[in-house]
Amino acid sequence: MEPLLEAENLTRCFGERRAVDGVGFSAHCGEVLGLLGPNGAGKSTTMRMLSGCLAPNVGRIRLAGLDLLRQPREAKARVGYLPEHPPLYPELRVDEYLRFAARLRGVPARQAGALVERAKRRCGLGETGRRVIGNLSRGYQQRVGIAQAIVHEPPVVILDEPTAGLDPIQNREVRELIGEIGTRCAVLLSTHILPEVQAVCTHALIIHRGRLVYSEDLRAGTADQGVLIALERPPATLEITRLPGVREAKELGGGRFQLELEAHRDAAGTLAERIAAQGWGLREYTPLRPGLEQIFVELAAGEIA
Amino acid sequence: MSTFVIAGRELRGLFLSPLAWTLLAAMSFIMAWIFLVQLDAFQLIQPRLKGLESPPGLTALVAVPVLRAAAGISLLVVPLLTMRTFSAELQSGSFDLLRSSPAGTSAIVAGKYLALLVFLAAMLAIVTAMPLSLLAGSHLDPGLLAAAVTGVALLLAGCAALGLFVSTLSSQPAMAAVMSYGLLLLLWLFGSDSDRGSLGAVLDWLSLRTHLETLLRGLVHLSDLLYYLLCIGTALALTVRRLELRRTEG
């Protein structure tokens, strides 16, 4: 299957500074990519290029199989974009605004009404259609911003910090909404909050000083990295190492062991069974996920150049 | 297609804000005052006009001065309208909605310009209705009136195009308004003094006012019409170019 969103070697300079430098990734239908990075890392610049608001100096962008630079009109009709600040017209009513957004993306007048209703329902804006956008609360304005990006039901949705400035309840609602959107199209969202990526994304991309430094599929099995176990009746460390699938075991004291596993996916399930079958009294079994958090914190602290 | 969608949104936004209504109200009030003063003066000198060989009529003495005044006042009105078009959208970030949409830059510019023209046409219609009301009890020179109205319409369209361009230069509406005032008044004043040899003649030709004056006298020269069309075309082309540059240069 061809990816819906494809970026290759994107580069963008502002004067001497390379804001984005050789960034490339792709997203298929049903994938939610989380673009992580400290402030000023190049997240917004990347998204502005993908939405067609900013031209890259170098690189290629394909949206739903169409080249954004060669066929801008067709490609842009297939993308929904929420910039950092929601692009609202405060004097319009929610219905008027969403209708305008749909018509602007080439939706025929006859279908616009139904699409606006559907977008409002998905974003929890059911009762606000007649209200003036300028009078809505920040959380509702953000929802209108998201509704604007999905009203024409595009295959690619780009959301720049969709949860910035929301309270925890609104935050959770917006995350649920993103999860729902992500089932039907390819979503790229940016944030500088790590748990948000772990909560809603299928992939994590970390961008730092304009470069893509880390990329991980969060859906993949994680047990091949390492496991923490606690046993009632611990045997000798050597005995644990003899279990198939275990490369190394380290005693941590108090019946706890940190195991390093052979790199195959199904090891995790069978290993738990084998340990239980040994009659050592398995109390605890915790897969360890190294990487994401550690790398993000190190990057934010400026340890990796 | 998207041009009309954008123009519709623009007009809606314009008429939902108090600015448009206040401008129309103020313009109507001032023009009504000037119209009545002109009419009064005409009635005062009317008995003396009868002695002349070919006396200037009601059109030349009332309708044309009213339209000339309207042209002068609209130099102050147009920048207030155009300042919002691009600056306000660049400031609030809503321009990203247009820029990320399939509508091309020229469609966006055409939509915004179209909305401005509709508003200015409404304003001109109100102003023209005043001298036209004299038809109820008198006779007007249709040729002279048509030429004068065409002149003012072209001037308004030219000013709107220049204002549109200026509003792409700054993301602060007030800044755009001040720059438009500067540009329009400069182009207006170029025509005030033409005894400076060849430079004076060039400035005279560049002026928004000299071309209007010919039309207000009832003389329709192709060169005057072309001047305004050239002015509109250049300003709109520069607007498109400027917005494209914003996209490529950031």
Image (spheres, rainbow, N blue to C red):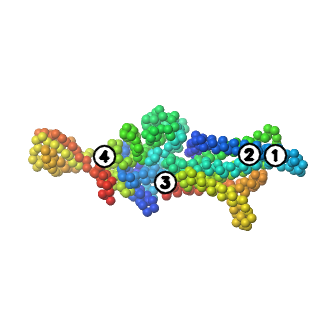
- Mark 3 belongs to which amino acid? Arg
Report the Cα–Cα distance between label 4 and label 3: 33 Å
C-alpha gap between disc 2 and disc 4: 74 Å
Identify the residue at horizontal 66%, vertical 56% (top origin). Answer: B185
Disc 3 is placed on an element classified as loop
Check residue A35 in the rendering and tell me which mark sits there, or answer none: none
Quadrant location, the N terminus of chain B: top right
- Amino acid at the residue labelled 2: Ile
* Quadrant assignment, res A303: bottom left
Looking at the image, residue A144 lies above or below residue A21? above
Residue extending farthest to the top is: A127
Which marked residue is nearer to the observer: mark 3 or mark 2? 2
Instruction: Tell which of A65 and B133 is nearer to you.
Output: B133
Could you confirm whether marks 4 and 1 are on the same chain?
no
For the residues bearing labels 1 and 2, Cβ distance under 8 angstroms: no
The correct choice, above or below, for A49 with respect to A198 in the image is below
The residue under label 1 is B42
Q: Earlier in the sequence, mark 1 or mark 2?
A: 2
Whole-number angstrom distance, CA of label 1 to CA of label 3: 65 Å
Instruction: Determine contact: label 4, label 1, CB under 8 Å.
Output: no
Image coordinates of residue A270 in percent, x first then y, are 19, 42
User: Label 2 belongs to which residue?
Assistant: B34
Please determine if labels 4 and 3 lie on a single subunit.
yes
Q: CA distance from mark 1 to mark 2?
A: 12 Å
Query: Badge 1 local density, few (<14 within 10 Å), some, or many (20+)?
Result: some
Report the amino acid beneath label 1.
Phe
Relative image position of residue A57 (x, y in whole percent): 45, 59
> Residue A218: which numbered mark, if any?
4
Q: Looking at the picture, do discs 1 and 2 lie on one chain?
A: yes
Picture quadrant of residue A165: top left
* Mark 3, residue position: A70
